[in-house]
């Protein structure tokens, strides 16, 4: 109830405003800085609960806790900050007799890195395991998506959860009026569809450039380009080329905001007969009423080293009552050259406790 | 060759002089105060522009570029910028403006802060600010405190112009005093006494005893007839304005901070307006007026849409005109 916060003050104001002058005057409140103290580790937990209402495989039609993500963040000292994100993921277990479907959970280090900001001159570095600077979406955690799952092209090219790997990252903010940032990373990832067999002396190399446009106070956009190369089985190297674009309209008044995001990737596989592949996705999210968001999404992905092509279209609606939770209903039509096609309808409830979420661009 | 050199020299002379301090503020209120104090010695850029909710800003990369070149970053603090501050400061890679840096300021630390929750705080209370209500600039006394401290801060960062910053801060405070109380009373009693009486809620009584109540003008004079009046506000952002001008907040349209109005809560607000004879439903321009009109249509209250920050309406061009506009609109709404 808001009243207790305001009534005592205002009540006093009313009483004293008409009071006769009294001596001595009561002491006045002076500015009081926040109570100092050693900052605790900032923690957060994001819960992703899903009910699969429709799926081509009836065994997938369940309500489950899809993922719980634990986040930790703190300064190490005046020079370093540390962040860690652990994911408790659901995975299918073996079917137990008489029990139908069974599931288990595994903990995965999604990210655990330290950032050094003491270089100066626009240079920033991090070391540890982190989400690679491939495009834009791969850098974000799933709770920041405007749709349920990672786009096909990122999963099929980089791995089920995209590319996150131990390594070193250095980024440079150019001293220009417009935002221009160059990032270079050396990574040692687990084997994935495109890159495999990476070692310290044969890392995956990722380069990303992004620039930003403020078209007006309400409309802005970010354009990025990615190049990566890394080892594949047999000692040759694969190449990845990508472009990413996001444009946002965020008016001052609530409602009617929109986000257009798209990424496209081409690969040259180093595998014998691997050839080239192409994939991409585009999504448009519109706030049709304050706190109500509709999303349309299209996916296309040629799987490296196979003849399979995955296509998908989806529609979703989300209600974000606060910054800390949302309810999302998503329909997706999925088609695969090899696995056939089908409809998937999922209801998601996602909520967050702990640290206030960042408003990432 | 000689001609080229002359042209090049003239071109260099024609370039504007570089400012000594590059200041980036989050809100336009802070930008207005910083411009008044820094004058031609500073360039000031605000991140929040137009009629925009200062809580709901994305960490745009362009902010990082602005901060990369900043000598001084001035935010409100008190978690107002919690959604984006950390990302843009880290992204700027500028050690001067990082927390603990010489060019990092949270102006809320210089202000008298209200609504500091006691006991445990949780999000069951809504999107509450555990360090206190961050809308500190809506008390002109806080604006005065911030201006004085900001003058000292700029003086420390640019010692060559220290006296100019201090003099400008004094001028800012002096102008604010006159606009608050009117020149006659400031001359008669001095600003410090007037602020002390105001903060102790003894201004009217003191002036009546001294026989000079009729001389009270400025914002305090315009609001004097409405002391003790009750107001409904949309969000808990007007606490400081209400406290300074001795108004009540009878209820808020949001059932809890940051939570949209619900039909049942609006129905209870309608009852409160009727029972307590509330005359005004006050809100910022970036909220829909639908909920305020729902209440106004069922009662005698008027909807007043007013700027809560510089730049939110056309007439709130700077920190002084923000209060000119706000006081006029609220006083007009309360008038019967």
Image (cartoon, helix red, strand yellow):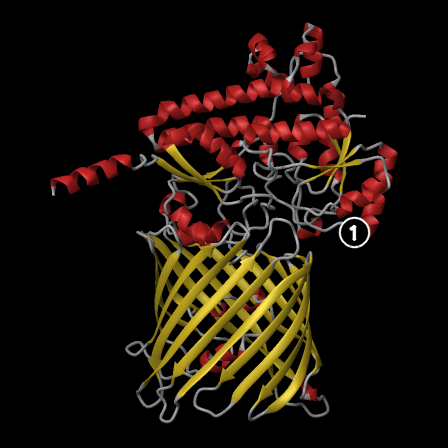
Image coords of residue B45 (percent x, y): 45, 41
Instruction: Report the number of discs.
Output: 1
> Which residue corresponds to the image point at 60% horizontal and 26% vertical from the top-left?
A29
In the figure, is residue A264 to the left or right of A183?
A: right
Vertical arrangement, residue B128 with respect to residue A125, above or below: above
Q: Is residue A30 visible?
A: no
In the figure, is residue A88 to the left or right of B298?
A: left
> Which residue corresponds to the image point at 52% horizontal and 88% vertical from the top-left?
A309
- Quarter holding the N terminus of chain B is top left
> Which residue corresponds to the image point at 78% horizontal and 26% vertical from the top-left?
B335
> Which residue corresponds to the image point at 59% horizontal and 81% vertical from the top-left?
A312
- Quarter holding the C terminus of chain B is top right
Q: Nearer the viewer, residue B115 or A347?
A: A347
Image coords of residue A42 (percent x, y): 53, 55
Query: Mark 1, residues whose alpha carbon is within 10 Å: few (<14), some, or many (≥20)?
Result: few
Image coords of residue B160 (percent x, y): 31, 27
Q: Nearer the viewer, residue A26 or B102?
A: B102
Q: Quadrant of residue A351?
A: bottom right
Q: Quadrant of residue A198?
A: bottom left
Chain under numbered label 1: B
Q: Is residue B295 visible?
A: yes
Q: Nearer the viewer, residue A7 or B301?
A: B301
Image coords of residue A105 (percent x, y): 59, 77
Q: Quadrant of residue B37?
A: top left
The residue furthest front is B3
Vertical arrangement, residue A63 with respect to residue A27, above or below: below
The residue furthest top is B211
The residue furthest left is B1
For numbered disc 1, what is the local secondary structure?
loop
- Residue under numbered circle 1: B262
């Amino acid at each position: 109830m808001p009243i207790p916060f305001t009534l005592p003050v205002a009540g006093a104001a009313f009483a004293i405003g008409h009071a006769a002058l009294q001596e001595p005057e009561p002491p006045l409140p002076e500015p009081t800085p926040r109570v100092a103290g050693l900052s605790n580790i900032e923690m957060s937990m994001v819960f992703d609960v899903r009910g699969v209402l429709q799926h081509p495989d009836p065994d997938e039609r369940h309500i489950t806790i899809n993922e719980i993500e634990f986040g930790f963040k703190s300064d190490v000292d005046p020079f370093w900050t540390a962040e860690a994100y652990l994911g408790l993921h659901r995975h299918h277990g073996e079917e137990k007799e008489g029990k139908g479907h069974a599931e288990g959970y595994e903990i995965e280090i999604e990210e655990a890195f330290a950032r050094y900001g003491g270089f100066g001159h626009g240079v920033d570095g991090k070391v540890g395991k982190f989400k690679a600077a491939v495009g834009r979406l791969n850098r974000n955690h799933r709770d920041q998506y405007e749709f349920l799952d990672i786009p096909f092209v990122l999963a099929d090219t980089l791995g089920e959860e995209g590319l996150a790997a131990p390594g070193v990252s250095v980024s440079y903010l150019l001293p220009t009026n417009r935002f221009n940032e160059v990032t270079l990373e050396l990574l040692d990832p687990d084997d994935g569809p495109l890159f495999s067999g990476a070692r310290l002396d044969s890392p995956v190399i990722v380069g990303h450039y992004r620039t930003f446009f403020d078209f007006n106070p309400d409309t802005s956009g970010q354009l990025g380009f990615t190049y990566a190369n890394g080892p594949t089985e047999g000692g040759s190297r694969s190449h990845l080329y990508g472009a990413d674009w996001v444009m946002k309209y965020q008016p001052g008044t609530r409602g009617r905001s929109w986000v257009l995001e798209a990424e496209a990737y081409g690969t040259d596989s180093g595998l014998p007969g691997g050839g080239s592949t192409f994939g991409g996705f585009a999504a448009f999210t519109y706030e049709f009423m304050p706190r109500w968001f509709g999303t349309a999404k299209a996916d296309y992905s040629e799987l490296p080293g196979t003849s399979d092509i995955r296509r998908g279209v989806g529609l979703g609606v989300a209600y974000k009552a606060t910054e800390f939770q949302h309810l999302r209903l998503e329909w997706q039509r999925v088609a695969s050259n090899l696995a056939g096609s089908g409809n998937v309808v999922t209801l998601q409830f996602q909520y967050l406790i702990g640290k206030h979420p960042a408003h990432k661009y | 060759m000689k001609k080229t050199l002359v042209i090049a020299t003239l071109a260099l002379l024609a370039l504007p002089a570089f400012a000594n301090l590059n200041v980036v503020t989050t809100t336009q209120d802070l930008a207005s105060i910083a411009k008044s104090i820094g004058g031609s010695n500073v360039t000031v850029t605000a991140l929040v522009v137009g009629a925009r909710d200062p809580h709901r800003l994305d960490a745009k990369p362009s902010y990082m570029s602005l901060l990369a070149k900043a000598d001084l970053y001035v935010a409100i603090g008190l978690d107002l910028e919690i959604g984006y501050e950390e990302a843009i400061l880290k992204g700027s890679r500028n050690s001067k403006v990082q927390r603990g840096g010489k060019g990092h300021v949270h102006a809320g630390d210089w202000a008298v802060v209200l609504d500091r929750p006691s006991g445990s705080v949780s999000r069951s209370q809504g999107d509450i600010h555990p360090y206190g209500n961050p809308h500190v600039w809506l008390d002109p006394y806080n604006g005065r405190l911030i201006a004085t401290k900001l003058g000292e801060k700029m003086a420390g960062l640019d010692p060559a112009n220290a006296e100019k910053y201090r003099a400008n801060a004094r001028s800012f405070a002096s102008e604010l005093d006159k606009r608050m109380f009117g020149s006659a009373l400031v001359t008669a009693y001095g600003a410090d006494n007037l602020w002390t009486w105001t903060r102790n809620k003894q201004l009217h009584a003191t002036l009546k005893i001294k026989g000079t109540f009729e001389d009270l003008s400025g914002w305090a004079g315009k609001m004097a007839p409405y002391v003790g009046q009750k107001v409904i506000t949309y969000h808990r952002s007007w606490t400081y304005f209400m406290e300074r001008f001795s108004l009540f907040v009878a209820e808020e349209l949001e059932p809890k901070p940051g939570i949209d109005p619900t039909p049942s809560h609006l129905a209870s607000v309608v009852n409160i307006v009727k029972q307590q004879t509330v005359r005004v439903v006050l809100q910022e321009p970036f909220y829909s007026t639908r909920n305020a009109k729902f209440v106004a249509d069922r009662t005698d209250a008027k909807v007043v849409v007013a700027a809560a920050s510089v730049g939110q309406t056309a007439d709130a061009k700077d920190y002084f005109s923000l209060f000119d506009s706000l006081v006029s609109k609220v006083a007009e709404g309360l008038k019967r």
